[in-house]
Image (tube, rainbow, N blue to C red):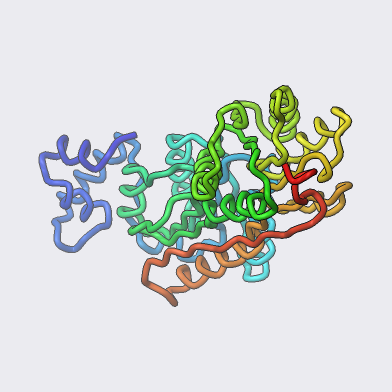
Amino acid sequence: MATLKDIAQIAQVNVSTVSKALRNSSDLSSQTISMIQGIADELNYPYSSDSDKNKNSKIIGVIIPEVISPYYTSALESMRKRLLGNGYRLLIMISGFAEEEETTCVQQLIANNVCAVVCFSEQSEFSQGLRDIIANNNIVFLMVSVAENYDVCDSICVDDWQSATLAVQHLVDLGHRRIAFLGDFLSDTRRRAYENVLKQANISVNSCYIFESTLRFEECGYTGMKKLLENSLPPTAVFAAYDNIAIGAMRAIHEAGMKIPRDISIVSIDDISVVKYLNPRLTTVTEPTQDLGELASDLLIMKIKGKRKIVQNVKLKPTLNVRETTAPPKNNI
């Protein structure tokens, strides 16, 4: 993707001049603005030269990594209801967890004159490409991300580290010492929090109790749990990175002839709707996706209507829900 620097080099001006030209700044002559915007058009660089062109739009663009995850769909449905009640509708695009695709989606949404963009992202850092787009377009932008403290736009994050800490600490407090981790390639933060809790409790981090995979959802949990049970000394408890993984693991435990939580405890994160109806009901950490969707909607509406100018970073706190899949280790081992 072209950058402000690319445009500046071709136009033989500095980056700040390009930025002003793309905003139709009165500091520049009409000839300079026309020349720089022409270069931007040739390079397919997205910009909004008319500050009023999207003010009457009632469409909000939303970028999510995938539609299969209950986490994203729950937040999305909460947003849809809240925004619909205020006269707005959603235009949804899928990024597939790719940073470049996120940027492309933002460009396309801006080209469709949406009045705001919400980007759900798993990227640990804010790309320079997105920074440039936000800085040079009259667009309300909100990040929902694992990263924190964005300085160019509003952001919301759930304290993922705290979610994992609550889950693993619960197992430690019950007396477990052989605690395993089941996760996929997107679960790095939760795995590192798991390791941190064990170290704080003076429990050795044993690689034979860690399963990470390119597999996802129930297949990851099912395959990983079977692998963990092959250990000569199996774990007495398992932290699954999210509920779908836990569900697969529970199936593998059942097939092995073991009982939950008598023989093995399991705890997870997300608190998706189905886990309350499992037998036994899953102990899990609630990440407030409904609250997230409603808060995101409220922040957007206030920004769109010009009622709030400051950049706001919000971190939502998780809560532990103890149900029926966790108990002290059998024979206190």
In this orientation, does residue 121 appear? no
Task: Give the residue at x 31% y 53%.
Answer: 136
Q: Position of residue 77 (x, y in %)?
A: 69, 56
- Is 177 drawn above or below residue 213 in the view shown? below
Q: Is residue 104 left or right of residue 95?
A: left
* Residue occupying image coordinates x 75% and y 52%: 283
Residue 173, relative to residue 248: is it above or below? below
Quadrant in which the N terminus is drawn: top left
Q: Is residue 166 visible?
A: yes
At x 17%, y 52%, the residue is 16
Task: Write the residue at 55% across / 51% down.
Answer: 62
**For this view, does 150 lie left or right of residue 279?**
left
Residue 60 in percent (x, y) is at 55, 57
Q: Position of residue 324 (x, y in %)?
A: 82, 53
Q: Quadrant of residue 298?
A: bottom right
Q: Nearer the viewer, residue 115 or 237?
A: 237
In the rendered structure, the answer to whether residue 96 lies left or right of residue 139 reads: right
* Front residue of 224 and 127: 224
Quadrant of the snapshot with the C terminus: top right
Q: How many marks?
A: 0
Q: Tell me residue 297's x, y (percent).
A: 57, 65
